Amino acid sequence: MPKVTYILPDGSETTLDARDGDSVMETAVKNGVRGIVAECGGACACATCHVFVADEFADVVGGPGEVEDDMLDGAVTDRREHSRLSCQIKMCADFDGLRVTIAPKQV
Amino acid sequence: MTNKILIIGAGQAGMQIADSLREEGFTGSITMIGDESQLPYQRPPLSKAFLYGEADEESLEFRNQKFYADNNIELVLGDAVVNISTTENGGVATTASGKTIEFDRMALTPGSVPRKLEIAGSDLDGVLYMRSLADARKLKERWEAAKNVVVIGGGFIGLEVAAVATKAGKNVTVLEGADRMMARAVCPFTSEYFKNAHERRGAKITLNARISHFEGANGKVSGVALEDGSVIPAEIVMVGIGVLARTEVANLLGLELANGAILVDEFAQTSNPLVVAAGDAVMLPNPTGSEGLVRLESVQNAVDQAHVAAKTLLGKRESYHALPWFWSDQADIKLQIAGLSTGYDQTVVRGNPDEDSFSVLYYKNGRLIAVDAVNHVSDYMAVRKCLTNAQTIPADAAADSSVALKTLVTA
Ligand SMILES: Cc1cc2nc3c(=O)[nH]c(=O)nc-3n(C[C@H](O)[C@H](O)[C@H](O)COP(=O)(O)OP(=O)(O)OC[C@H]3O[C@@H](n4cnc5c(N)ncnc54)[C@H](O)[C@@H]3O)c2cc1C
Ligand code: FES
């Protein structure tokens, strides 16, 4: 199972094993990692699952799709270079070791 | 002193109350009881990703088993509260299986049930509803074999199922009793777009439909008969004609109702001081600050009202003010709504419905109050932010679709 590390707004870190194909959002929420709100449950309709992908993973993970890009424009924490909606990043072996920082404000 | 909290109804709102109680630092006992047997799960994907086969049952769960253990939330599943009484400082609930659960305070989040269509043949196999995972499984079991699908009711859930069915190459007919679709939620312009859009994708749509009865053979539905004598073949009939609040427990407690739903105030407090309620089953003061009571059947409302309810349970009073929002995914059409359009007196259309991308802005007394955005996320997000900040966008300027809405926001 690929691992993903969440860096919380207070600086603490949590590492979890992700089920292959589960999103970075689902993995966090199901395990009770706070900070990712994910009101719409992954439908790319709320922008409350905003994360910043660590620089070293930005290329392999890639940028947002078109809908996600427009949603990010309206996210409560202003977007940065490697902003993504975590419900749109599906975990796979290539992303093993992924590090994401949870945006400080989601709602 | 509140030590024992009971949550009746383990769905979107119940789950959120449990989570918010822990987030707020509550260390007493939390018991959440639900009459469905699976771990609490999300309903929206049932008529979307789950039906497409893109999401499995496990992926619908809000949290994994470990979360409930870690957070000391006792789950009682597959059991319903059938009896309950309260005194001045607490109460006791009895379940169908005979369990008794004592509590100091209680949250009622029972959701709703589909309104039933009671006509001849309505008990035939293949006449289905869509509220629960059990309902969705029934639909899926019959899905492959069905060539003809009739959807009764042109609301969000019906149209989502219709979209999945047309995409799967089935013959799809939507029968809507009113003269337009989604009439309660959107303006005639948006209704008209959705009719055309579903027709372009292969569905047949009949407005003002008058249904007589269901026809069947060997206990299975075979068609829907209309009052004009015609029969539309169907191996699956999906009935989506609205929902009714579940009020069994509320009635046992004698809680005050309004329009058949549990009446609460802006703190999610019911007429019983020990009991809060949230989600689909309640009637609440309009959270946008406008006059009157509303019923909101959406994830946003269940979640946001649950936060308020959890605080009330802990004696922290915070009134419910939020911008309602909603989404519906119908094949490649993404509808997003922010605000409540009730009482609008002007609309502005931006973009092009023929290209499946546009938005309708709703105004009342010259101020923006809501948006329907169809594959137009930038307008949706601009309005959402604008209304959250109690700002507006002048209608005349908004009419120019070439200008980005977010640049037009004013106080
Ligand atoms: C198919 C479908 C698609 C949807 N799509 C969207 C969408 O795209 N966007 C959106 O915003 N909303 C959508 N919704 C609406 C959204 O799911 C609901 O608004 C939300 O689930 C309401 O939460 P709730 O907690 O009030 O009720 P529920 O989630 O229904 O939870 C209530 C639970 O309480 C249980 N219960 C009731 N009485 C008792 C009792 N006496 N004892 C024990 N348990 C009891 C019920 O069985 C149920 O499990 C959709 C709903 C459905 C059905
Ligand atoms: S969970 Fe709603 S956009 Fe990601």
Image: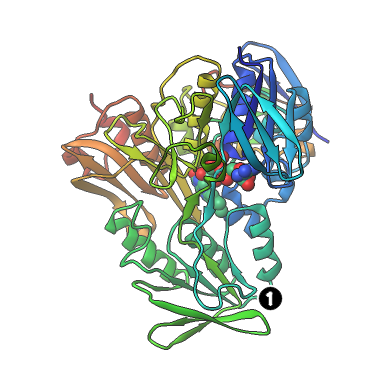
**Label 1 element class:** loop
The chain ID associated with circle 1 is B
Above/below status of B380 relative to B139: above
Indicate the position of residue A4 as horizontal and vertical percent values: 75, 28
Q: Which part of the image, by quadrant, shows the C terminus of chain B?
A: top left
Which residue is drawn at the image coordinates 37% and 66% (left, top)? B195
Q: Name the residue type under label 1.
A: Ala
Indicate the position of residue B181 as horizontal and vertical percent values: 37, 62
Which residue is drawn at the image coordinates 58% and 38% (left, top)? B12
Indicate the position of residue B378 as horizontal and vertical percent values: 39, 39
* Residue B101 figure quarter: top right
Which residue is drawn at the image coordinates 49% and 28% (left, top)? B272
The residue closer to the viewer here, B300 or A86, is B300
Above/below status of B39 relative to B210: above
Q: Quadrant of ligand 2?
A: top right
A38 relative position to B197: left or right: right
The residue closer to the viewer here, A8 or B183, is B183
Indicate the position of residue B125 as horizontal and vertical percent values: 65, 74
Mark 1 neighbour class, 10 Å CA radius: few under 14, some 14 to 19, many 20 or more: few
